[in-house]
Structures are given as C-alpha cells and as structure tokens.
Amino acid sequence: MRTRFVRSILSAILIVAGARVASAAIVADPAYVVGAIPLPIVNAADVAVVGASIAIGQGGFGAGAQSIVRLDPNGGVFTIVSNLNSIGAIVYDAVGDRLLFADNAGELPGATTGDTVYALANPRSIVSPVDAATLTLLPNGSIPAAQAVLALPGGDLLVGDAAGPGSGRVVRISGGVPSDLVTGLDYTSGISLGLAGGELLIGNVDAFFSGTVTRYSLAGVVIAPLASGLGGSYDQAVDADGSLLLTGGFTDDFSSSTVIAIAPDGAIDEIASGFGFSSGLTIDGPSRQVMVLDFGTTRIDTLTPVAALTPGGGGSKECHVESFGGAPVRSSSGKPKNRWECTDGDPACDRDGAANGACVFWVGACMAVADPRVPKCAPVGIDVVTVTSKHLPAAAAAIASAVSAALPATGPTCSGTTIVPVTADGKGRTFVFDASWAGKRRDKDVLSLRCRP
C-alpha cells in the first residue's frame, strides 16, 4: 500500500493527540478571541465556509466511509457528497461557486473512487448526497496522495501530492489536463496564494516531521524559503494582513498542537495552542475569523481577530461587547464605525452571493474583550446581553439566543453567528446590544447594517 501523509507520518502524533483532546483548553494570543462552533457530527476531516454555510468532511477512515456535510445557518444538516475514503482537503471556490476536495485513499479494498480531486457545483443548492464517483476532475489514481487543493484566478487548480520523501509534488490542472508544477517534495501539505497574488506558498513536511514553507512563482520556480524547522505543517491559509496561518505544528515537548502565523518577512508567531492535533483550517473572509478543527473533538474552534471586531466607540465601556461578522465602515483616520455596508451580490460581504434584492450578513458578538483600540476600557465579566431591533426583531432575538449560549463570560469570549438578511434599499437596520453583569449595565452598543442595490 502506498505511503499516506495522514496515515504514516502523523500516526504517532494522532495517538498522542487522541489521549489528550478531551481536556484540551485553547489559549490564544491576545490579538484573538477564542470561541467554538458545536458540531452535530463526529470525526470531522476538514472545514470550508460556503457563503453563510459551513462544509465539513466527516466519517471514519475507510472505503466509502466518509462524506461531506453542509451545516446551514438555519440549523439544517445535509450530506452533500458521499462515497469518500480519506478526505485530504476541502475548499470553496467562490468565483466558480464550486466545492473542491481531495481523497487520498483510492487503493483501499472496496473503494470505487479516490486518489484524485473533485468538484461539486452549486454546493449551497444540494440537499441530497451526490456520489463522489460522479465528481472526479481527474481519473481515480491520478494523484496517489492528494492532500491540498487551491483554485487559482482564471480557473486552474493546484493539488498537492503528499507521496513521501522525494516523491511529493504539486500538480497543476489546466483545461482538465494535469502537469507537474513542482516536484521533489516530501509530504506536501498546504498550498496558498500570497495576498498580492503573485506567488505561491507551499508547505512541506519531511520524514522527520520537520515542516517548511517555501515561496514559489506561479510558474513553479523557487523564489526563497519563507520558514523552516517548523514543528509540523498540515493545513494553511493567508489572512487579511498577508500572514500565512498554519496548523499541525507541535510544541517542543509534544504537549500541545499549535496554530502559528508566518508574516511575509518570515517572522513566526504562535497564535493559539492547547489543541490535541490542529488539522483543518479556513479563514472566513468577511469576519476574518479563523476556524480550526482539532482532531477528535465535536466542535470548530474559532479565533476572531480583535482588530476585526466592531466596537461601539472609543469610551471607557466600549470593550465589554463588540460585534463581528462583517467589515465595519471606517473613518478617514481608519477608525471603525458601528456600521457595515454591502452591495447586493458582492461575495466579499453578501453571504448568499446573489444579487437578489437582499444582503445576507453574519452577526455575532464578543464579550469582555481586551481591545487596544479602546485603551480607556478595562474589560469585566458579562452575564447578560440583550439584543433588540425595531425593524428586525426576529433576527435580534436569534442573535441574542446565540450570544446567551456563550455567557457568562469572565474573559474574552465570542458567540456563534446568526444570519441577518437586509433588504437592498440602502436603509440601515439597527441592532442594539445591551451588556450587563450582576444586573449592572456595562456597555450599550449600536450596530447598523445597510445593503445597497
């Protein structure tokens, strides 16, 4: 049987991780607020945000045993792809409105598909399982250890083949035709496009589990190393500041798996630890929230950047409750206002991605935030947050319910999100967040959502 990245170089680590997952507590850099999204499934394999929904790979390793599930914001749970064996990656291509994914165990007895890459068109409209065998972009067995997928502007795909020492590669698929873009790798892990779009960042792990990230041109020519000597590498994504976030690393004593950020100049910062084995990773564009899967848990751990939150102002109370989910309008000096604006159909902010007369926002709240943008505010505990809206009372009640599930908060904590459709008439819809502790009001914020036609 061919060597597999997931089942060989990581096997010992997964045993260690499985022994400590239940008691793991995520600790984040002060620039992030920790939260969690409970999952109604077990054995989650990878995660991708699909508009207002979340796609999760799930199931135990085995021939036809894995599938992809879509979690809708209204609570719907739909299996949208079936008959997978060992999911290597799941990503959403918003430009092409397609879900891309890989399977690296097509050689298993009984498997009818695998060792290739797939595409599911219009994934938000699927309500019953589609057999993966009908979705292949290349013949089964074309990419023996398919592990990472990246959609390039223009429609071409890159797929990482984690085939082992010296055999790892990156395959480019253009017009349905595959060709080797990069060769001579080992256990190829993540592939990302740099923020400026002119270079690739390719992760690799050697036989001793030492990770590296190298900068390549779009033609596959080495530019320069970005980072080396990493304690592993599994999945990655580029954030809004151009830093590359990586999962799959471990502390030196193997007591905790980490998430790190590598700045464009190569500086490395550990942004979160306490995972059993941090595996799948994605970054939601509008909210900038980082979503991380931890091996063996039934949740998605979230890391929400403080800099992406919307405070109500700059006073001494403004850090006790702050909203997240969209990008705030900013003043001429760059300070965030308590208003989000979107044009109907703009995928950067309208989560249904369609020009249909309304914008769909995600709205959540973080409490007791240590926010350097409001230095006069010293965060305190919050045990009650009420949310009201004159024009959208049902949405306000749903937001309040999601926030209440995260309370009481005695330290920085984020709630889950709620979808809020706003009519594309250019008028603001206002929500009032009223936070208190032991009956004493601590903060009152207003958030305005506006959708332009």
Image (cartoon, rainbow, N blue to C red):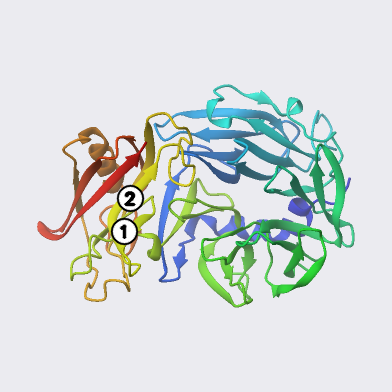
Res. 277 in view: no
Q: Vertical placement of 316 versus 303: above or below? A: below
Q: Residues within 10 Å of mark 2 (few under 14, many from 20)?
A: many
Q: Secondary structure at mark 2?
A: strand
Residue 310 badge: 1
Asked if the residue at tag 1 contacts the one at tag 2, i.e. Cβ–Cβ closer than 8 Å, the answer is yes
Give me the disc on residue 90: none
Q: Residue at x 45, y 39 (%)?
A: 351
Residue of label 2? 340
In three-dimensional space, the C-alpha distance between marks 2 and 1, rounded to whole angstroms, equals: 9 Å
Quarter in which the N terminus is drawn:
top right
Residue type, numbered disc 1: Thr
Q: Is residue 210 left or right of residue 294?
A: right
28 vs 434, left or right, is right
Along the line of sight, which residue is nearer the eye, 233 or 220?
220
Q: Residue at x 84, y 44 (%)?
A: 143
Q: Nearer the viewer, mark 2 or mark 1?
A: 2
The part of the image, by quadrant, that contains residue 310 is bottom left
